[in-house]
Image (cartoon, rainbow, N blue to C red):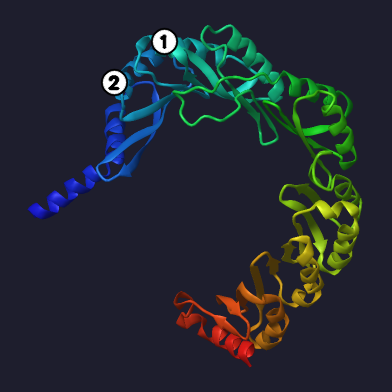
Amino acid sequence: MALAIALMASSCAANRGDQLADELSERLEGVDGIERVEVGGNNVLPFAGDASGTIVLEDGISTARAAEIAAILEPYVSGESPDYELMLGIDRVDLQVSPSEESNASGLRLLDEVRQRTDLSSATIAYGAGSQACVVAAKASADAVTAYDGLVSLRAATPGCERAGVLVTHGKDQSVTDAPDYWEHVDTLPEAVSISKPIVSLREIRDQLDVVSYAIRPGSLVLGMSRGEDVVAADELARKTPGQRVSVSGGKINAWSRDVPAAQLVLDLAALSSVGSVSSDVRGLQIGGVDVNDVVAIHQQAAQDPEAAGLSRISISGTVAGDERYQIAGPPDVVAERVAAAPRLAAYAPFALADDVLSVQVAIDEVSDMVEVIKPLAGFGRLVTVRDDQGREVTFRSAGDKIEVSEAERREEVRPLLDAISRAWTG
């Protein structure tokens, strides 16, 4: 019995983060004005850890009562290496809890102002230099740029926050930040960098074209257009403002600027009805949504274009019979052979033949035919994965007229598939 008690005590101590979270939850149980406690433990090492989370207060709580609850929490976040990192959640605004009563008072004053704003659906307030409370992140209830403008005015009117970076989002399609790098800890605020140039560009483009999404950060403007036909025009308008990187998507074009490799080829491929999507970047040319019956023709058009000489890689993906997926990829000098094999590989979809990987799916009674198709493609040293219609899967490395199989792959349940492949491969 004594040993059992000792082990239980040791286990609790070992999960120190969980223990800290439980202790705070117990302390706050029944405290007037608290709706719920969302605090969890971080058990980083045995017998070491901390706790973090949000104390959600009741909607409409008075500033005075919120200050009293903050005072309860101040000792928990005090010291050089506090055990807790806590936020107060009040009317959709999260406020970092400071060990200083004066700082929490300034944070609550700012929170009162923020939660009255109709252009924000939520916000986060943290502390910068001199323990000054600053808005560092917010979700806009409508347009993100409009909300950002309002927060910039608020920042300018809040002494000590003039240089604190802020991130504003609206759904998944709008993002504005003047912080060059996102921050990991709320006690180290990002320093704001001017984003006036990309904002000017966005406003001019929206006056003339239909923009459905955007992301603005220092020196960068990323646009999503409702029509693929507007991609080039949007890029040209954005480049009227110098000193910013530009990327535009729309229609079939996933990402484009006049600086991408094979820029005109991307536009030409996007105009084809047999292409579903296309983009080009440092990783090469990516063509998607291509039926396997069209892959040879699409590759030929791309490969014969003069711009293709500057590509490091070509990737083509799509469907077989409108259902199963496939992908073919590699450097331009080897991808042609892989594309030529696509019609034969289609019988074993979903399949992938990219870089050093080859994967197929096969009915167990068609293994011999499958090996006849994939063995020349596997060459020497390629990793091959085969799935069958019984749900079994094996991975091996091709070695000429034999296959190399690790001990981990020699499982009893996959033995029928592995034996069938081995016989066909060496036969």
Where 73 falls versus 282 (above or below)? above
Crowdedness near tag 1: few (<14), some (14–19) or many (≥20) residues, C-alpha within 10 Å: some
**Residue 220 rendering spot, x and y as whole percentages:** 71, 30
- Which quadrant of the view contains residue 308? bottom right
Amino acid type, mark 1: Ala
Q: Position of residue 404 (x, y in %)?
A: 54, 80
Name the foreground residue: 15 vs 424.
Answer: 424
Q: Quadrant of residue 396?
A: bottom right
Which residue is rendered at x = 63% and y = 89% of the image? 424
Seen in the picture, residue 384 relative to 314 is either above or below; the reply is: below
Q: Which labelled disc corresponds to residue 105?
A: 1
Residue drawn at 89 percent across, 65 percent down: 297
Q: Secondary structure at mark 2?
A: helix
Upstream in the sequence, badge 2 or badge 1?
2
Amino acid, disc 2: Pro
Tell me, for residue 157, which label it has, or none. Answer: none
Pointer 2 residue: 75
Above or below, comparing residue 59 to residue 362 in the picture: above
User: Viewer-proximal residue, 39 or 220?
Assistant: 220
